[in-house]
Amino acid sequence: MDAQILFPFAEYYWFYLGFTVFVLMMLALDLGVFHRNAHEVSFKEATTWSVVWVSLALLFNVGFYYYAASNFPTDVAWTKSLEFLTGYIVEKSLSVDNIFVFVMVFAYFAVPAKYQHRVLFFGIVGALIFRAIFIAGGAYLMQFHWVIYVFGAFLIITGIKLMLVPEKDIDPNKNILIRLFKKLVPVTSEYHGQKFFVRLKGVLHATPLFIALLFIEVTDIIFAVDSVPAIFAITKEPLIVFTSNIFAILGLRAMYFMLAGAVDKFHFLKYGLSVVLIFVGLKMVWLNDAFGGKFPISYSLGIILGVIGLSVVFSLMFPKKLKEPLS
């Protein structure tokens, strides 16, 4: 465990505030200017936005390095910038699971392509709020050394489960929160443009678009239970956990529209992600102590990139066999 937190919230609250304002401005620009009118997001547009979000994250990391180098020794600044990059890559990789869910949810509710960006936009806003809460809670809990072993064991178990348990089809109607919501609020059977709620005969109804959004929010909370401890395994700095996590989430919508049609091709990625989760879990419960309190971040970055890269290469080398139609 790091000897001390270099960027404590009490001293860097101004940075959190400024970063949050920046994120809100980018989201307002995204929805209020570029996606003011509902339209189907093209591959070209999604790729452009993906490049924008990744570039912003990398530029932030460069600026973060120079700021850290002006206040701490150069080797410390380099380590912290690598921690940000590693955390960003881990969260980006784990976000692929979200894309699988997006594909299945949109197919299940038959969400028109031109309204999918609106659902994901508000889904991401909700995810940002819940991630901030989870990270704040995680930062508090990480003060207690025994929590490190609990988080580590949880990640190892989650990784093994992801590797061994077969995937199941999603049925939102079986989700207890969705069922409870439908008992409290009537839901229309058809869409009403891009509206989440509509008033019919004086009674407020939710539309299927809102149900799709609600299910995406619920599943993201579940995913956050894995991803937030995974980044705390990389760094104990809440500021790095917060910024790397948020940057990865901001690019999630663009990544979905870019990869939605090809996501099924990366069938070995599931196993790569499970190995990554097991590795970061082992870092917390064993490797950090074995290496004098901190497993080298450069080794972590190399292992994570190698595992994810190999899983993508194997997916392309050994394509998934399509099920033959029943005669």
Image: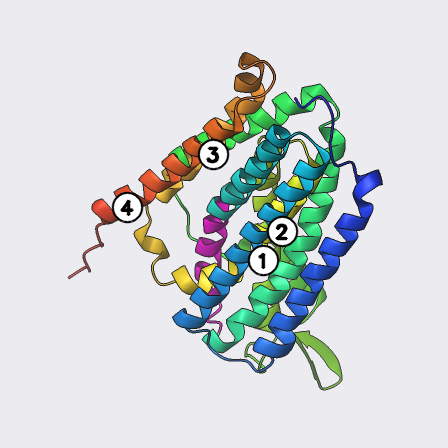
Using the image, determine if residue 59 lies above or below residue 84.
below
Alpha-carbon span between mark 1 and mark 3? 21 Å
Magenta segment boundaries in residue numbering: 94-111
Alpha-carbon span between mark 3 and mark 2? 19 Å
Q: Which mark is residue 250?
A: 1
Choose mark 1 or mark 3, whichever is in front: 3
Task: Tell me whether the residue at label 2 lies in contact with that at label 1, contact meaning CB atoms closer than 8 angstroms.
Answer: yes
In terms of secondary structure, where does tag 2 sit? helix
In terms of secondary structure, where does tag 4 sit? helix
In terms of secondary structure, where does tag 3 sit? helix
Circle 4 packing at 10 Å, graded few (<14), some (14-19), many (20+), is some
Mark 4 or mark 1: which comes first in sequence? Answer: 1
Alpha-carbon span between mark 4 and mark 1? 26 Å
In terms of secondary structure, where does tag 1 sit? helix
In percent of the image, x 49 and y 30: which residue is there? Answer: 298
The percent coordinates of residue 32 (x first, y second) are: 65, 76
Task: Tell me whether the residue at label 4 lies in contact with that at label 2, contact meaning CB atoms closer than 8 angstroms.
Answer: no
In percent of the image, x 74 and y 80: which residue is there? Answer: 203
Circle 2 packing at 10 Å, graded few (<14), some (14-19), many (20+), is many
Using the image, determine if residue 286 lies above or below residue 201.
above
Mark 1 or mark 3: which comes first in sequence? Answer: 1
**Amino acid type, residue under disc 3 in the picture:** Leu
Task: Tell me whether the residue at label 1 lies in contact with that at label 3, contact meaning CB atoms closer than 8 angstroms.
Answer: no
Q: Residue furthest right?
A: 10
Q: Is residue 61 left or right of residue 302?
A: right
Residue 152 is at least partly visible in this image = yes
Residue 101 inside the magenta-drawn segment: yes
**Amino acid type, residue under disc 4 in the picture:** Ser
Task: Tell me whether the residue at label 4 lies in contact with that at label 1, contact meaning CB atoms closer than 8 angstroms.
Answer: no
The residue to which callout 4 is attached is 315
The residue to which callout 3 is attached is 301
Residue nearest the viewer, comparing 42 with 176: 42
